[in-house]
Amino acid sequence: MANTILIGAQWGDEGKGKIIDVLTESADLVVRYQGGNNAGHTVELPSGKYILHLVPSGILRPGCRCVIGNGVVVDPVALVEELQGLERVGIDVAGRFFISDRAHMVLPYHKQLDELREDLKGVGKIGTTKRGIGPAYGDKAARVGIRMGDLLNPALFRARLKDRLVEINDIFRAHGWEEISDRKLADEMLEATESLLPMITDTVAIVQKALSDRSGILLEGAQGTLLDIDMGTYPFVTSSNTTSAGACSGAGLPPHRIDDVIGVMKAYTTRVGEGPFPTEDQDLSAHFHGMGREFGATTGRPRRCGWLDSVALRFSSQVNGLDRIALTNLDGLDTLETIKIATCYEVNGRRIDQLPADIDTLRQCVPVYEELPGWGEDTSGCKESNTLPVNARAYLARIEEITGARVTIVSVGPRRDQTMFR
Ligand code: IMP
């Protein structure tokens, strides 16, 4: 198998979990390389529905090895709970699940700071998942973070935590919060994470070995391109590089060893949290929520829904270097008479087809739509892409034209057998 990066081409929640699961049939190693347990990758198998937050989706395939790479921020307590949940349903991770010693930890104070910053922002809040992601990456960049490898040396872990808590407790005092005892927190963390210790290792070596053995590596992106800290709708973004470039630094492999970049996109657009979303449409949101679709896998929040956006998709295809597309949720459009696609934006009396970096400008952008006829047929039982309704196939062709990438996978439902290859 090729070394493949799979990323979200929109604002996250594109259905990456399902596509990764389908692709892991032929992958030896699946690596998460950014984000943390803000992600929620849903996989539906005959044995049940699984929502994975930190553990790569490949864990559901027996024999597939999985890595949490150095670019991920790990809430170790949440990880222990997730692993216990997998064990309870009979998924054995022993000997095939590894955590990078370089990955930074999300500690309880990061979650408190995430909440505090959101509260202080008030109406201007980002709408984070409150999992402590921003503060943990902030510590990493400020070089005051604590890493998973530090757990292997308790004395060092205690010393680092003690150092870090000097500034954290200053902040807590200023807000009238109870100070954190470094000894108590260190004791709690060391006890809670004991089961993880055998899994913490130099995962770069695992990735490099897979490269030299020519085993296929699947790099599992989380969130989506427009939430990228550099390329997204800043500041309404997450704190990591969600685009394909993040895979190399977050897993420890060179760009020239990447063979294939797959962008997962929904047949429409959704976003959770705040921030500009030019093609958002209240009626479409009501339509999907009425069908029981589009509620967040991590927070349960209703997702904001809208039409496809060529401006955003072209940008996504360019910055990720998409080789191909996995299109999901096509069946969500089955009952619509007309389907809209934004071809460009109108702003200040001008038409533009580039995504503005400035969110105030983006907020003023009014999408210019083209309309395509719907297909009015249930596609959820389609097994071959050439049996899709003609108008659905025309929609796929239009997406290929916009992105310049072939749609090679089409998903019409959550199950593995609701997937077509083209
Ligand atoms: P954070 O990653 O929790 O800091 O949240 C920052 C922004 O990214 C918020 O708008 C979140 O709703 C969004 N976000 C974070 N993770 C995901 C995800 O997995 N899917 C979709 N949106 C996400």
Image (cartoon, rainbow, N blue to C red):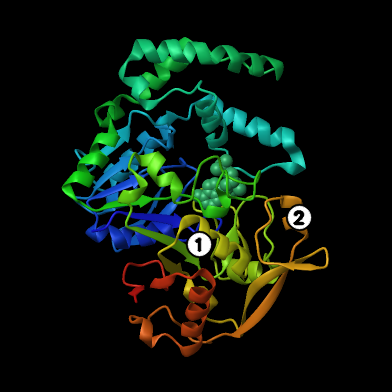
Image coordinates of residue 326 in percent, x first then y, are: 41, 67
Quickly name the residue at label 2: 361
Instruction: Write the residue at 60% across / 42% down.
Output: 128
Q: Residues within 10 Å of mark 2 (few under 14, many from 20)?
A: few
Any mark on residue 317, and which? 1
Q: How many marks?
A: 2
Nearer to me, 15 or 88: 15
Give the residue at the far left of this rendering.
213
Image coordinates of residue 92 in percent, x first then y, are: 22, 44
Task: Using the image, determine if residue 229 lies above or below residue 132.
Answer: below
- Cα–Cα span, label 2 and label 1: 22 Å
Give the position of the N terminus as an image quadrant: bottom left
Task: Label 2: state its secondary structure.
Answer: helix
Task: Using the image, determine if residue 267 lies above or below residue 300.
Answer: below
- Whether residue 279 is visible to the viewer of this picture, yes or no, is yes
Q: Amino acid at mark 1?
A: Ser
- Whether residue 299 is visible to the viewer of this picture, yes or no, is no
Instruction: Write the residue at 42% across / 37% down.
Output: 71
Give the residue at the far front of this rendering.
256
Give the residue at the far right of this rendering.
349
Instruction: Write the residue at 45% across / 14% down.
Output: 160
Q: Amino acid at mark 2?
A: Thr
Task: Label 1: state its secondary structure.
Answer: helix
Give the left or right position of residue 386, taking residue 26 as reference: right
Image coordinates of residue 38 in percent, x first then y, are: 50, 43
Image coordinates of residue 31 in percent, x first then y, are: 33, 45
Q: Residues within 10 Å of mark 1 (few under 14, many from 20)?
A: many
Give the position of the C terminus as an image quadrant: bottom left
